[in-house]
Amino acid sequence: MKKITILLFLPLFTVAQDFENNQTKHNNISFSSSVIAESDDLSTDFFNTMLFGGFITDQMKEDWINSGDDINRLNAEVRNSFHYSFLTEKMFSFYLTFSDVNTINSSFKDDLLKLAFHGNFDYQDETLDFSNTILRADRYQQYKFGYNFIKDLNNNNSFEINTAFSYLSGNHHAQFHTNKGSLYTSLLGTSLDVNYDINALVTDTTDLSLFAGNGSGLATDFSFTYNKDESEIYSICVKDFGFINWNKNSIVSSTDSTFSFSGIEIDDFDNMFDFNDSILDISTDVVDDQNKKFRSYIPAKISFNYTKKLDYVIFKDLRTVITSRWQAYEIDKGGLFLRGFEESAYKTSVDIATMMDLKYLYSYVGFCTGGYTDGTKIHLAITNKGRNLMIGTYNFDSLFKEDKTKLSGYLQLSARF
């Protein structure tokens, strides 16, 4: 079974500080660009057919349905950022970051694919369950101001605190959440039993320009880093914990119903307009559409990091990063904190890597499990000693395969003066 994962390498290793510093520069300006498009079950043939046209065969559909576990996850992100920081004489720093962000992620069961690809004929006397289906898309700009504080302690120990606040300018948002959903088809299709509870939130669709001002919000960052004996680093980081309030022209829709459809009964063939249709028993006001304000959350990242300095000639350290994401869907329901981890559709990831000194370059090599996809990913990043150019790949292993089902890359440019 072929799978596709396309993502741009994210600089996971910049959370923990490097042990070796170059000559201090007080100004730093950088540009970075990242693109993520990944799936844990989507086949290469299916993906290419959707992008470039062609016929989607029944075999392609079956391959997608039968691959992986029962939950399908899709995720995409495009982020471009400009960053400026100023380091004071006392080793405090201030920084400004502007980012343009586009995200989309979804999570849905195989039963929804079965219904979409094959209809319900092949599933007589069965119940298709498509509960907990999530689809969410955002576009916004982020203006971030941050402050970094470093305090030296005794015995070569130190700690570092970083805080930041962001203003979010929201352009567009769409999210659909099926809390519960099922379809039962009786033998020979004589009756259908449908049960669903669906909520949808969509911003104003009258203006679809890239920089439409449909909302605004706030976000915050916080991290604490402890440097022990200049040989070990411990840190905890919360990044982009925030929300966007969307304006009153947004559409808030909900529908919740349970009904059975047993076909049409004709009492008199001489009067074809005299019939009983069981679907007419469904209330016509099950869909509630309103134009009003609502709030959505952006994906927050929570990470724990440990770095150990090594004394080998080439291998300079060993880094471990554990990352989770938080992005709750519904605000009014209880258990907001715990739901946020589940509704993010992100599995806690574990990343282990090492920094190598290659004389003229630094190289970061490691592997990662978890995230939006299944399996283990091998990553590689290279930067020059001045650290003003970094390139990398999150799927280094795929470069040696004839059928490159996983491609990735990251590029960051920096200047210090």
Image (cartoon, rainbow, N blue to C red):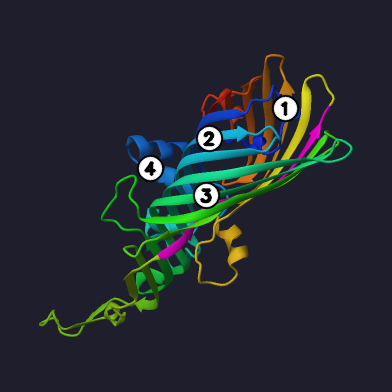
**Among all residues in the image, which is located at the extreme front?**
89
Spatial CA distance of label 4 from label 1 is: 45 Å
Hey, which quadrant is residue 270 in on the image?
bottom left
The residue singled out by tag 2 in the image is 83
The residue singled out by tag 3 in the image is 166
N-terminal-most mark, 4 or 3: 4
Q: Is 200 on the left or on the right of 9, as rendered?
A: left
Above or below residue 184? Residue 273 is: below
* Image spot of residue 362 (x, y percent): 68, 22
The residue singled out by tag 1 in the image is 355
Spatial CA distance of label 4 from label 3 is: 47 Å
Q: Is 283 on the left or on the right of 21, as rendered?
A: left
Give the residues drawn in magenta, as a range.
294-310
Residue at x 57% of width, y 52% of height: 220
Residue at x 37% of width, y 78% of height: 260
SS class of the residue under badge 1? strand
Residues at discs 4 and 2 in contact (Cβ within 8 Å): no
N-terminal-most mark, 3 or 1: 3
**Among all residues in the image, which is located at the extreme top?**
360
Residues at discs 3 and 2 in contact (Cβ within 8 Å): no
Task: Tell me which amino acid carries mark 4.
Answer: Thr
**Among all residues in the image, which is located at the extreme left?**
270
Give the camera-side residue of 101 and 48: 101
Q: Nearer the viewer, mark 4 or mark 3?
A: 3
N-terminal-most mark, 4 or 1: 4
The residue singled out by tag 4 in the image is 57
For the stretch drawn in magenta, the main secondary structure is strand
Above or below residue 40? Residue 276 is: below
Task: Tell me which amino acid carries mark 1.
Answer: Met
